[in-house]
Image (cartoon, rainbow, N blue to C red):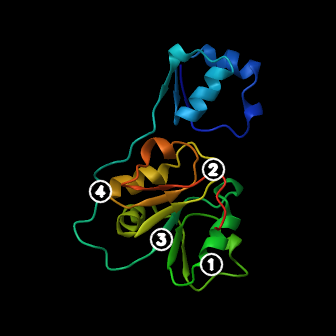
Amino acid sequence: VRVFITHLDSERSLGSKEVAMLNRAQRLIFQNRTVLDFAVSKGVSSSICLVGHGAVSEKDFYPSENIPLSRYVLISGECKPRKNPKLVEEVILDNPDLHFVIHGRGWEEFFKNNKPSNLDLLPFDKIRHADLMRNASLSLSLSKNEGGPFPLLEALASGTPVVCSRTGFATEVVSNESGVVLSAEPTLK
């Protein structure tokens, strides 16, 4: 039995019952070091744990050979409370001279009454996603809780710089050369 753990909804998600179940596994693969360390602090055996960030296909995600003609900040993923949609909206409204593209499900509903003119909303399309990532000027992730976020790996493989909150494996994969990691709860400032 192998278990892949991306993130926990809260610290209460890992009680003694869950720890006992996890300790019966052959291998626990955590998407980031923070959750692994937390699980070990709760009693999960470190001998069965390892970190596996995940991977992206280099057939799909690779740097562009040319400088992209369009300039936009890409936000990708489903609109969920943990994705921090209110802060995303504040950033878009506070930067009217930047063009933003959100590629994911549920954002149409979030912006249905007040879509800023500097924002394009695109329903998620797996086939189109790699091109959007490769041609973006920047990938932005302001999530409150993540295992990854996986779009960081996609952006880095595509040669697209990132600005992201300190969640999931952000500090493990983003370097000073590839982007900026903000605080765990960034503000508009």
Instruction: Specify few, some or many for label 1: CA neighbours under 10 Å numbering under 14, 14-19, or 20 or more.
Output: few
Instruction: Specify few, some or many for label 2: CA neighbours under 10 Å numbering under 14, 14-19, or 20 or more.
Output: some
Horizontal and vertical percent for residue 176?
Answer: 40, 53
Instruction: Specify few, some or many for label 3: CA neighbours under 10 Å numbering under 14, 14-19, or 20 or more.
Output: many
Compute the Cα span from label 4 to label 1.
31 Å
Q: Does residue 80 appear to the left or right of 99 in the view shown?
A: right
Mark closest to the chain's N terminus, 3 or 1: 3
Mark closest to the chain's N terminus, 2 or 4: 4
Q: Does residue 54 appear to the left or right of 118 in the view shown?
A: left
Q: Provide the residue designation for mark 2.
A: 184
Is label 3 or label 1 in front? Answer: 1
Q: Provide the residue designation for mark 1.
A: 94
Is label 4 or label 1 in front? Answer: 1
Amino acid type at image mark 3: Val
Note whether residue 143 is visible: yes
Q: Provide the residue designation for mark 3.
A: 73
> Which residue sits at x=65%, y=22%?
41
> Which residue sits at x=75%, y=18%?
16
Compute the Cα span from label 2 to label 3.
20 Å
Compute the Cα span from label 3 to label 1.
14 Å
Amino acid type at image mark 2: Ala
